[in-house]
C-alpha cells in the first residue's frame, strides 16, 4: 500500500519486489500507483515489466502501448513491445517498434539485429503460398487486429528534420534533451519554449532555457554560426525576457 498519498516513491519498492520475485506484491503496488497517478509513465513501465515476469503478456502489452502513445520516445517500452509482438507473430508491429527505437538510438545493436531478423521473416512469409480463401480470411482477420500506429510520428520527424521544424508530436522534455545532446540546439530550444508556454511552472524546462541562453554568448559572435541559429538564440533571449516581465 502506498503510505504517502502525495508521493511517488513507490516505484523503487515495486522494482525491488520484482527483483526478489514478489510479483503479486509488485503488481498490486503498481496498480494502486497507476490508479492514483494515471499519467505517471514510469509506474506503467514498471507495471508492464512485472506483468511480463508474471507471464501476463496482454496486460504488459497494454501498459507499454499506453506509454508509447503518450511518450513516443520511451525506448524501454518500444523495446519490450518489439519482443512481445515478435513472440505473438505480429512481425509488422515488431518492425515498427524496432524502427521507433532506432530513431532515438541508432547504435542499438540488439534492436538492429532483431530488425534484420524480422524483415527476413517477413520476406519469407511473403513467399509462402496462400490459398485464395485463406488469403481472404487472413485479410479479414488483419483488419480486426489493432496495432498502435506510433510510426507515423517518425515519418513526421523525418520531414521535420528536412524543414527544420518540430511539431507537437514530440513535445516532451526528453525529446528536447535528445536534440540538445545531438547538437540540434535550435530544435531543443523550440521544444523547451513550446512546453514552457503550456507549462509556465515547469522549472526544469525553464532552467534548461536559461542555461542554453547562458551558453549562447560565444555563438552570437561566431562568424561561421548559421544566421538561423543566431536568430533562434535571439528569440530565446526575447522569450525569457517576456517570461521575467510576466512573472514580476
Image (cartoon, rainbow, N blue to C red):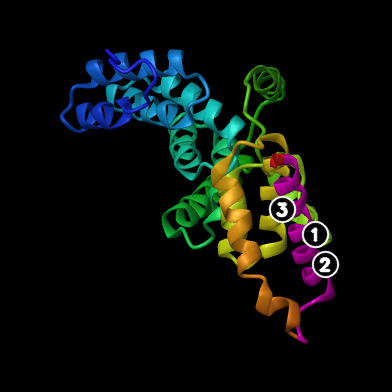
As drawn, the residue found furthest toward the front would be 248
Question: Magenta segment range?
Answer: 223-246
Q: Pointer 2: what residue?
A: 231
Tag 2 near tag 3, CB within 8 Å: no
Along the horizontal axis of the image, is 48 left or right of 165? left
Tag 1 near tag 3, CB within 8 Å: no
Identify the element where label 1 is drawn: helix
- Residue 61 lies, in percent from the top left, at 47, 25
Between label 2 and label 3, give the one nearer the viewer: 3
Q: Pointer 1: what residue?
A: 235
Query: Which one is nearer the viewer's eye here, 211 or 96?
Result: 211
Along the horizontal axis of the image, is 58 left or right of 17? right
Tag 1 near tag 2, CB within 8 Å: yes
For residue 105, above or below residue 221: above
CA distance for labels 2 and 3: 14 Å
Along the horizontal axis of the image, is 115 left or right of 188? left
For the question of whether residue 199 can be seen, the reply is yes
Residue at position x 46%, y 56% from top? 113
Majority secondary structure of magenta residues: helix
Q: Pointer 3: what residue?
A: 240
As drawn, the residue found furthest toward the bottom would be 223
Amino acid at each position: 500500500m502506498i503510505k504517502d498519498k502525495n508521493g511517488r516513491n513507490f516505484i523503487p519498492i515495486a522494482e525491488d519486489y520484482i527483483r526478489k520475485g514478489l510479483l503479486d506484491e509488485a503488481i498490486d503496488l503498481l496498480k494502486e500507483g497507476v490508479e492514483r497517478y494515471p499519467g505517471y509513465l514510469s509506474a506503467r513501465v514498471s507495471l508492464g515489466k512485472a506483468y511480463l515476469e508474471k507471464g501476463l503478456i496482454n496486460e504488459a502489452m497494454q501498459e507499454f502501448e499506453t506509454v508509447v502513445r503518450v511518450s513516443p520516445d520511451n525506448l524501454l517500452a518500444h523495446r519490450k513491445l518489439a519482443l512481445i509482438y515478435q513472440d505473438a507473430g505480429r512481425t509488422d508491429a515488431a518492425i515498427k517498434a524496432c524502427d521507433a527505437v532506432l530513431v532515438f538510438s541508432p547504435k542499438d545493436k540488439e534492436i538492429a539485429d532483431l530488425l534484420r531478423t524480422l524483415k527476413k521473416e517477413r520476406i519469407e512469409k511473403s513467399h509462402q503460398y496462400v490459398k485464395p480463401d485463406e488469403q481472404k480470411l487472413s485479410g479479414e482477420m488483419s483488419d480486426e487486429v489493432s496495432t498502435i500506429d506510433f510510426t507515423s510520428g517518425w515519418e513526421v520527424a523525418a520531414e521535420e528534420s528536412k524543414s527544420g521544424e518540430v511539431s507537437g508530436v514530440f513535445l516532451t522534455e526528453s525529446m528536447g534533451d535528445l536534440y540538445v545532446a545531438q547538437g540540434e540546439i535550435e530544435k531543443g530550444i523550440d521544444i523547451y519554449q513550446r512546453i514552457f508556454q503550456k507549462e509556465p511552472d515547469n522549472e526544469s524546462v525553464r532552467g534548461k532555457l536559461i542555461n542554453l541562453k547562458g551558453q549562447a554568448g560565444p555563438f552570437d559572435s561566431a562568424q561561421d554560426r548559421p544566421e538561423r541559429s543566431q536568430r533562434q538564440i535571439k528569440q530565446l533571449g526575447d522569450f525569457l525576457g517576456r517570461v521575467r516581465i510576466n512573472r514580476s
